[in-house]
Amino acid sequence: MNRSELEANARAMVAPGRGILAADESTGTIKKRFDAIKVENTEENRRAYREMLFAAPGIAEHISGVIMYDETLRQKTRAGVPFAELLAKQGIVPGIKVDAGAKPLAGFPGETITEGLDGLRERLAEYYKLGARFAKWRAVIDIGAGIPTRFAIDANAHALARYASLCQEANIAPIVEPEVLMDGDHTLARCEEVTDGVLDSVFGQLFEHRILLEGMVLKPNMVISGKKGPKRASAAEVAEATLRCLKRHVPPAVPGIAFLSGGQSEAEATEHLSLMNQAPGLPWALTFSYGRALQESALKAWAGRTESLGAGQKAFLHRARLNGLAQRGKYTASLEAA
Ligand code: 13P
């Protein structure tokens, strides 16, 4: 394990005014995004779409790292430059999703366990050779009647820590992502209670597994009310509860926290991040690692048309710039129209 390499990459991923683009949708997930804009899910369309994002002029100003999917890491630009190289040349850290997805947890109806540990050591060695310098593993915790159970939380935290340990052995900085879903009708208080328990378990396991906290990035959900709830919590409430929860669990040794957007609208995700970054004296960098909240407008502007690649890049850059400002606590809703 090369501590200084891991620490340098983790710090670069959460550098001031910048954040991470999650473009690691599996072939099945990107189909859902393409279906919405009536684009056929072919390997060439996936490649062309990712090239549009990664080659958008000037993205490096706001984007510090990109999470790719296995197929994407092996793809090239039209001109034949591997994506990892295109990104690294711009000073953007190339990353790779390495989990194999959340599968039903036997004996625990409604709960999942994330798979992908078998053979991970060998895959990480190959990914490093292909240029990846950080990785991502997502654990999924759903809130519902009687769930999550402590057992499912601990099983997922254990797998996250096993993954993180293998990453660090391979000199790949792990993004540790325990996502508490916002899909239900639960209150913000319930989300906070569950997120509290999840982060407690995750950091306990990271400690037991001897993880170098300085060489990782946490990717949590925000503490937020369920999407189907009767009354959504305000942005100020989300920011306050999220910071309270993180301060209780995340040691200052962790260089940065990069939130997932989890189904928030683009503007909501940006506003929440900006509000949190207005708090004084935060012990870690707070930034974004958004998928949907960075890509929604860009997907629509592009809509699969070659002649709209520029419009797609423009929409993506706009979102990246607003989130870069949010990282500095300088976003205002009036900038949306600009
Ligand atoms: P969203 O921001 O769309 O939630 O995606 C981020 C991500 O990488 C989820 O694993």
Image (cartoon, rainbow, N blue to C red):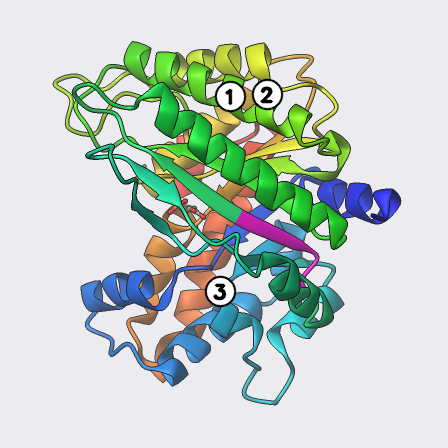
Q: Is residue 111 left or right of residue 50?
A: left
Residue 204's tag is: 2
Foreground of the two, 259 or 337: 259
Q: Is residue 114 above or below residue 280?
A: below
Mark 1 → mark 2, Cα distance in angstroms: 5 Å
Q: Amino acid at mark 2?
A: Gly
Residue 295 horizontal/vertical position (percent): 39, 56
Residue range in magenta is: 132-136
Residue 188 visible in the shown view? yes
Q: Is residue 257 above or below residue 251?
A: below
Residue 299 horizontal/vertical position (percent): 33, 63
Disc 2 vs disc 3: Cβ atoms closer than 8 Å?
no
Residue 201's tag is: 1
Q: Secondary structure at mark 1?
A: helix
Q: Residues within 10 Å of mark 3 (few under 14, many from 20)?
A: some
Residue 184 horizontal/vertical position (percent): 19, 28
Q: Secondary structure at mark 2?
A: helix
Mark 2 → mark 3, Cα distance in angstroms: 29 Å
Q: Amino acid at mark 3?
A: Tyr
Mark 3 → mark 1, Cα distance in angstroms: 27 Å
Disc 1 vs disc 2: Cβ atoms closer than 8 Å?
yes
Residue labelled with disc 3: 69
Q: Earlier in the sequence, mark 2 or mark 3?
A: 3
Residue 58 visible in the shown view? no
Residue 216 appears in which quarter of the rendering?
top right
What is the residue that sits farthest to the front in this orientation? 107
The residue that appears at 35% across and 68% down in the rendered structure is 27
Q: Earlier in the sequence, mark 3 or mark 1?
A: 3
Predominant secondary structure in magenta? strand
